[in-house]
Image: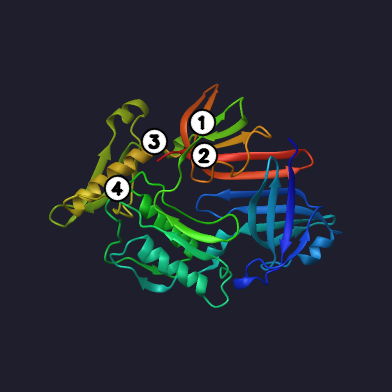
Amino acid sequence: MTVEYCVELFDGAGSGRGPGSKIAEVWDARNVGWSRYDRLPGKGFFTLYQTSPALSLLVPLVTHVRITRVGASAVEVYNGQFVDYNSTGDDVVCDFYDYLALLGISRAGFRTMYPTKALGTEIVLPEIDLALAATGSPLGFVTRGTIEDPLGLDGVTVIKTNDQFGTLDQMRLQLFYDISEMGRANTDNHVTFRISRTSPFVFQFLKNAGASVGLGLVLNGNVNDYAYAPNWLRYRNDLASVGMNAAGGAAEITKTDATAITAKGLRQDVAVLQTLLGITGAATEADQQQAALERLLHKAVTRRAALWLALVPGTLEPFTGWDIADKAKVEISNGIDSLTGERRIVGVRGVFSDAGENLSLLVEPVA
């Protein structure tokens, strides 16, 4: 199957500084690349000759870029803004970031307090509204969509902050990331946030994104190579933290996995209980802390192993029947690696050059 990439440029005169009129199709772009990730900005890039007429149309922090992949069907794989370039005597490498990156230049308030608030509707919602409505906001063209409240381990109780929670001049990309981590803590929920890949561009904060989509990723099938980082350096089987005893005083909490110690030896660490939010139904805060540390120990023993899968050209259409946060079945059996079972897609990247297209997926264990 023949694959082509179409690169289009738009001025920044649209509503809210968004993409306005189409000003060019860039057919002399070389080494076109794009990526999209779960909760993190995706990068795009391409190379132009110094003589390319498109260079005069690329205005940093103003021009918008759309990349459409034309394969079995036409799919917009990337929308973002031109941010910078690197030039040499012959070439100019142009860099772009998708619209989620704009939250990284949007600042939350100084000592804005959110005591005992639901994470989504009572914190993320007012913060994204402020980001979108700020005078001169580069996010003025983005609209607010679904905002959900993450639930605790019981699947019913809405997670809330403690009575002292607030922001202190934090960038909103990091704030929303931290809030999503709080929503994930001590649960199996995949709390995430995103700005939609295609127009209309909508911000969402979801309490448990992703579905099992029946996609198989098999080495020597639709996967021709992989890169695996098992993450054993972060393996721990004995954790300690400072918590609270029944009387309200400071106390050490320890949790140990005896079976893991027998297998790998004693590997200790100190954990900071940044949030107890996902633990619901505990009688006291001390009970919550015990349960939270137990959960952290489980994660420390199981690890978060990153796996990049290089796809056989033509075997998978981007964002067709699947999306970021969905779950696929992985089968890798090769030498010392035996990686089977369901994993979550948390990243995708593509590069198109004279040699053709290379697509790869980043997957991680399901929580």
Discs 2/4, front = 4
Q: How is the image coloured?
A: rainbow
- Pointer 1: what residue? 330
Badge 4: few (under 14), some or many (20 or more) residues near its Cα, within 10 Å?
A: some
Front residue of this view, candidates 363 and 237 = 363
Kindly identify the residue that appears in the image at 52 percent across and 75 percent down: 134
- Pointer 3: what residue? 302
CA gap between label 4 and label 3 equals: 23 Å
CA gap between label 1 and label 3 equals: 17 Å
- Residue type at numbered disc 4: Gly
**Residue 83: image location, x then y, percent:** 67, 63
Tell which residue pokes out farthest to the front in this image. Answer: 73
Discs 1/3, front = 1
Q: Is residue 257 left or right of residue 302?
A: left
CA gap between label 2 and label 3 equals: 15 Å
Query: Which callout, 4 or 1, points at the residue further toward the start of the chain?
Result: 4
**Residue 321: image location, x then y, percent:** 55, 41
Which numbered marker is on residue 155? 4
